Amino acid sequence: MTMKLSLLPVYLLGVSLFFPTRGWAEAPPQLVDLSPNEYAALERISVNAVAGTISFLAADELEGRGTPSRGLKIATAYAASRLRAAGATGLGPAGSFYLESSLEVVHTSSHGLTVRGQDGAGFRSSLIDGRDASLEFQGEVPRANTKTAAQQRYAGPVLLPVGEEDQTWPPPTPWLRREANRLQQQGATAILLEASSNSTFWNLATTRQQTVRVDRSRDRYALPIVVVEVGSLTDNHLLELSIPANIVESTTVRNVAGIIRGSDSVLADEAVLFTAHIDHLGLTASGEDRVYNGADDDATGVTAVLGLADAYGSLETAPRRSVIFTLFWGEELGLLGSKQFAQAPPWPLDKIIANINIEMIGRPEAEAENKMWMTGWEASDLGELMNAGSRRLAVETFQHPSYSARLYRASDNFSFVQQGVIAHSFSAGSLHDDYHQPSDEWEKLNLPHMTQVMRGLFAGSLPLAQGEVTPSKR
Ligand SMILES: [Zn+2]
């Protein structure tokens, strides 16, 4: 990195530094000085260190870090060991780095599912949501008319027509939820959906058969949902149905959290919270490359949090405020790990002055190298405060014209926003073609860019950690 050679001498000479290519001549930003010790900490964030971390987290051996999975457990053990090495202490019970939650995994299996006609011929079918108990049925399956009045009564499974235009995944879930609620109230016991066997809907309905829920009482749908190949049932509604029960498995998952306590006796009660999600999508059911590596999403964020912990931990004196480093499970399932953290916080939420959540910093958009955008730009002045520190490294945080507003609610920061905490996601990426695909591999990342952005996050967050500035809501 050229930074190493150019910045340190300039700093030592006390010369203020401008970047001629950035066009800031008219309104030079207020640059925050870094001490030699802070520079030394910053330099620990190197391309090699970044490559070392990310190539492990995104390795096929971690099997896509699905929630819950063995790969995710290994990733969290690795993160805890790195936080330990950085000199952090665990924020969990008795100094543990783990904040555990119990979780139920509901496997909906089509094994044992039968949909047979009058003549005994079986129809191709797949169960997309089951029940705790199995269901056997023999008789007429009426076609539910979505237009009929609420007084219509059923007494068994019903066939629900899905228009051609609806045959994409996810199925219009709110619609299906509403229909399931309505049909249950009208006495139906199961829903049969018709789908064409060459539709996306069919493909996904037949491969995604595992759901995860924190609270077992919250079912996805009010009724079991079976997808049946379209055309099968047009002339024959006399059916024999056997719907197998879900298999429910209890397990535990864990957020990882470590803290470097502040060195100022008063300010140490306040903390800057750095976060990223360590989970991703796990494995696909079939295909040549089955691993959703989630290199950019969000092994880059985890690498950043671990790199920041290492940099902060290497300071001769800890920053005046406390700094907390947390990695969440279950983001991909609906911000589950961060919700859990925010509901049972190991640190008072009103003492978290900012949550800096790091998401996808490995693949910049064209013209956006060494830049990052902050979500929810309008909500606080955090972006501007970060810039005061990071611009010394020519790293700028900006308001992305579309993503900043759109993605504010899309990641773990939002679990904290909902509790009144100033919380934003910082991203230096793009929604590239490999996003949420098995092809999101670490070799495709722009590591020098990512490294520089991490350095920017360190330099940008230092004034906050040192208690020099405090962000406020707008
Ligand atoms: Zn993500």
Image: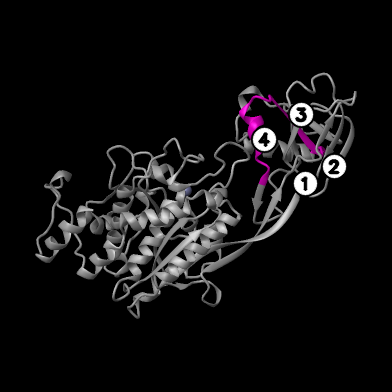
Q: Which residues are magenta?
A: 186-210
Mark 1 and mark 2: Cα distance apart in space: 8 Å
Q: Image height check: is 357 above or below 463? A: above
For residue 157, what is the image quadrant? top right
Residue sitting nearer the eye, 68 or 243: 68
Residue 343 location, quadrant: bottom right
Can you identify the residue that label 1 sits on?
Answer: 131
Q: Which residue is mark 3?
A: 124
Q: Are marks 1 and 3 in contact (CB under 8 Å)?
A: no
**Mark 2 in CB contact with mark 3 (< 8 angstroms):** no
Q: Residue flagged by tag 4: what amino acid is it?
A: Ala
Pair 4/1: label in front: 4
For marks 1 and 3, give the CA distance: 20 Å
Mark 1 and mark 3 lie on one chain; the one further toward the N terminus is 3
Q: CA distance from mark 4 to mark 1?
A: 16 Å
Q: Coloring scheme of the render?
A: one colour
> Where is residue 255 drawn, in percent x and y?
53, 62
Direction from residue 237 to residue 473 in the image, left or right: left
Dot 2 or dot 3: first in sequence order is 3
Magenta highlight on residue 77: no
Q: Is residue 355 visible?
A: no
**Precedes in sequence: disc 4 or disc 2:** 2
Indicate the secondary structure of the residue bearing disc 2: strand
Mark 4 and 3 residues: CB-CB less than 8 Å, in contact?
no
Tell me if mark 2 has few (under 14), some (14-19) or many (20+) residues whose alpha carbon lies within 10 angstroms of its own: some
Residue located farthest toward the bottom when viewing the structure as drawn = 265
Label at residue 135? 2
Which residue bears the numbered disc 4?
A: 205
